[in-house]
Image: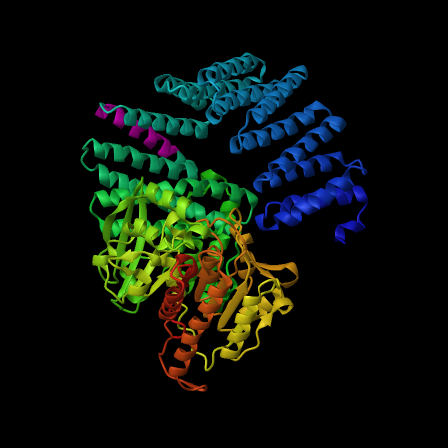
Amino acid sequence: MNSLNSLPDAQWCRERYQELHTANMQASQLPAVIEGLQALFERAIPLNEFRVAAGCAMLLSLDYKRLGEWASSIRWAGQARDVAMEHFGWPMASNASKTLAQVTYDYARDLPSSEIFSQLVSLLTDGAERDGRHHMFEDQADKYGFLSDVELVRAAKLEGVSTQDAFQNSLTWLAEAEVLIPQLPEELQLYYMAENIYKRSNAYYAINDISTALVYLQHACNLFQEAGKEREAALMNKRIGLLNLLSVERDTETTTFSLNETLERFQRSEAFLKTVGFQEQLADCHLQQAWAWERALLQGHEGALEHALRNLDTAEQIRNEIRMDFTLRRDANSLVQKQALVSRSADLYTLGFELSLKGNDTRRSWWWLQQGKARGLLDLIGFGADMPKTIKADIFRDKTASRLWEQEAAILQQLSVTPPGDRFRLRESLANLRRSMNNHRTLHPALVYRGARSLELDQLESMFDSRTDVVCVDWAVVHNKLLMVSVRPGQEPKISELEILLSDVVSWIQTNMRPTRLRQSSATDRLRNIDPLVAPLATNSNEGELLVFCPTNILSGLPLHALNVGQQVIIERNPVIYSTSLSILQHCLQRQGRARPKSLSVAILADPTSDRAAATESASNLGSQMNTDPLIGTAATAQAFKCAAERVDIFHYHGHVRFDVNEPLESAFKLAGEQEVTARDLFSIQMRPKLFTMIACESGRQRILPGDEPLGLMPVLLLAGANAVVGTMWNCWDTAGKEFTESFYHSIHLGWKSSSRSDQEPLPSSAIDLALALREAVLGIRKRRPEPYFWALFVLYGNWNLVS
């Protein structure tokens, strides 16, 4: 029972609401907060604490919206409006009605239908009429402005809705709002007029009348400046710059003057945004200037490429600072803002790669490619992950690292309570501090994890211990083109345009990445259609060299090692490891200095759902081979999983995994008693395994999706502390899983015995090559079962040396 229950009921309700309101800002606490808010709503009504009840309903609406549960979000927003209307009347219900309209609008944008748009229009018109009856003209004008937006979005989202009709309807609603402006307080009139004119520009933009839209934007900009609304004026300048840029792109005969005008607009907006500290808008402004300079490059302007890249560099630095702030802050606001930022970031890195390529700077192109992956590392995993326990432990054992870490937290706390205009000095201090952090080796894993540190080309040699028989392979997407970017440590990158288009690969995947297709004897021949994805390796690599594959985008779901180079399947020609990015691989290799144990400790968890006899048999055989007692069926509990992960060198899991596409941190290992260990749980475990193997059983799904289960768990396991992860690219046929396990661990067992004089005296500097062990196991299955479904699914991520 909460300690607040000792208070009188009404006071308890109010204080409990404040407690939940504060907790609601923590994204990781969302499920518990929702449960608490629902319980408090039910308790507040009979206690006549209707403000508390309405507040709970409003928060619940917003929480369910964040979860994408639109029906619940709309229902709770309606509850908030109804409670406010019944007990306080329309003046309070008007605000709740606007929240209901906003939630419905977001739903309509996400899942558009004529019915939901009709409901939204009815909701807003009814609210506006009620506002008018209560002389709430400001709220009424807001709702009319909202209706003008709804008309334009409805035409954009629904087929069969006339854009011209939407344009006329939008202007009609704005005329209704304009009539109300003289009835507003004098200090608000200029602002509302500027807003009205800005919305008119949107209406003209919707019908592609760019010149008229620009006239209205300029007028709105002037009015915002007159009203003292500098932020809005800066955003108008930014919008004017965008429309000018659009005009440049549409008109091949554009004059130098119009391009200069576009850049002037952006630079004016940039100066203001920099002064007041609006970082996100400032980053966008630099990105848009880069696009303008790219257009200038096409027109042959001298120095355009350098200007474009300089603006991209600045935009990238600003966005990375924002991303780190969002990663470190735990509030729900940061979740929404970070998701919006992530959705806009891909263009920046693609443009940087493309422009560097135009300048024949392959090193810089490679850097942009790695930067995009490093910055997107935590984005891939999702928002809300705690720093892995192993990384935190290392930081707090190092006094200097700990001091730097705590100083950063203190500055971020100051930034969170400092007005935007006063943040300049703090951000300078933060930038200087982060330069010191970047130079401290103990902090490197944390910075890699946060996406704050990417790999530099000159680091590859030390990363691979000066080995020259390694080729790192990335793929890049530019429009519909695919390019391979390969590099050896100590050499310059090689970039090759592939003789296959992205659209062709997408089409191939949609047709062929299905269990029934991959089981067919003709599946091998069909793989030949996408061999161009790896064709440059015929000249950029030699047989027997280690290939490090870092696939991009939709390629991450393809068994690239099953393609041919010349007449050889890659996995036969070369040992292969995969990595989400080279930064993650570096993170794993930096841990390889852990002391070599005198014996390998092994944990085996298998068939926790008691529905896979082959998994039980395989685990029993493996237990005998590795001299350990497997945990099978009901013994394979969540607690057993967590305990084993903190103490063993090798962790073998043979069972079911669940991948959550929308919330990757909720992806989970299924364990006995309907228990689960989620990806989020892994970060609270001090993971010790040098090798983590997961064999995912066939679960009857009829379609294989690129990047699907259990691939999403692999980067999480590596970041949480595992040094290497073996997994499957799709659900595994039981017999193939059993055969792979026997062969793979047989190689490990033999390698361990040959590298030790006895169980007590290991040879120094010896290692077991997991890439070779996996290759041998895969090729063994392929000899018996040549169809790709049975052998091409097994992959190794992370450090290929089991013991260093």
Residue at horizontal 43%, vertical 75%? 746
Give the prevailing secondary structure in the magenta stretch.
helix
The reply, left or right, for residue 481 in relation to residue 232 is left
- Residue at horizontal 35%, vertical 79%? 765
Q: From the top left corner, tell me how far across and down residue 315 is, in percent.
A: 35, 42
Task: Tell me the quarter of the image containing the C terminus.
Answer: bottom left
Query: Is the residue 432 above or below the residue 50 in the image?
Result: below
Query: In front here: 656 or 394?
Result: 656
In this orientation, which residue lies closer to the viewer: 31 or 774? 774
Q: Is residue 157 above or below residue 390?
A: above
Which quadrant holds the N terminus? bottom right
Dividing the picture into quadrants, the one containing residue 143 is: top right
Query: Does the magenta portion include 259?
Result: yes
- Percent position of residue 63, x then y: 61, 41
The residue segment tinted magenta is 254-272
Residue 198 appearing in the image: yes
Whether residue 683 appears in magenta in the rendering, the answer is no
Q: Is residue 507 left or right of residue 356?
A: right
Classify residue 490 as left or right of residue 10: left
Spot occupied by residue 531 in the image (x, y as percentages of width and height):
29, 52
User: Which x, y percent locates residue 204?
Assistant: 41, 18
